[in-house]
Image: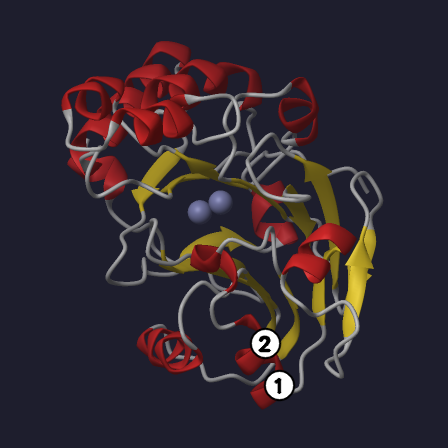
Amino acid sequence: MLRRMQLPLALGGPASRLAVLGSGSAGNAVVVECGGRRLLVDAGFSCRQLEKRLALVGLDGSGFDGLVITHEHLDHARGAARFARRHGLTIHATAGTLEELGLADSELPTRVLHSGAVQRVGTFAVEPFAVPHDAREPVGLVIEDRGGRRVGLAADLGARSQLAWGRLRDLDALVLETNHDLEMLRSGPYPWPLKQRVAGRHGHLSNREAAEGLPELLCDRLRWIVLYHLSRTNNLPVLAAEAVLEALDREGSPARISVSEQDQPTGWLELGAAAAARADGAPSGRR
Ligand SMILES: [Zn+2]
Ligand SMILES: [Zn+2]
């Protein structure tokens, strides 16, 4: 298990890569990069904290094509307006999310995302899809860079919906919520109504639900599965990792996992360049 959790050697070339700046109920943010252009997905930390974490992975606020916000909850949007303003970025989110954030008529540049409609954000193509969660108009995302590398992100979803699982196909990296261990949630300190909310259809995905849904999403090109949005109260990294690795082993998948943490960024997870992936024998994507 340890071997598979280590970072791979960089393949070289104009690589695509991603890093989670931090994840959990206190804040979430992900950077996807291709050929030096970047996309920030969610900004659930203060602007200052975002900049600090970007510095930890060797970046500053430059080179971003835009900021995509999945939904209005503070752990995804806390620093969005300030970061966008400071770095001159357009915020991309659904109409419901923009409204809830008070950005629908703001002076900040925004663009409305529509579930099911692919939208270009700089060099990236972003496809949002609706997810069941207790926010106004939350979405998961598939992000494709100009090299055809595809990253899927599904967090803050109460259940594996057919729609989400239909979209999360042919990915090079999957960022997937493994929020809680059901036993830890059941016996943990949360009051009953909150336990019901977390485990409910509009709450969060458990380790087991994520692991059970994985076989459908595995494909030859899937290189990374990033375990995301772990609860500090109701989960342990080792439990989430065990559940997912068990599913991968059962399916004989060579995909590696990275467990994201609340307090520090993951290292860069290399997705390789299109040419390197073809040399690997992996499919070259849809294009
Ligand atoms: Zn969240
Ligand atoms: Zn949420």
The answer to whether residue 243 is above or below residue 274 is above
Residue nearest the viewer, comparing 122 with 115: 115
Mark yes or no: residue 163 visible: yes
Residue 228 in picture, x, y percent from top left: 38, 43
Residue nearest the viewer, comparing 273 with 97: 97
Q: How would you rate the neighbour count of disc 2 (Cα within 10 Å): few for under 14, some for 14-19, many for 20 or more?
A: many
The answer to whether residue 34 is above or below residue 246 is below
Alpha carbon separation for disc pair 1 and 2: 6 Å
Disc 1 designates what residue?
85
Left or right, 64 with respect to 55, comes to: right
Residue 42 in picture, x, y percent from top left: 53, 60
Q: Amino acid at mark 1?
A: Arg
Which mark is drawn over residue 81? Answer: 2
Residue nearest the viewer, comparing 38 with 70: 70
Mark yes or no: residue 284 visible: no
* Label total for image: 2
- Badge 1 marks a residue whose secondary structure is helix
Q: Amino acid at mark 2?
A: Ala
Which mark is drawn over residue 249? Answer: none
Looking at the rendering, in which quadrant would you find the N terminus?
A: top left
| Residue shown at 56% from the left, 85% from the top | 62
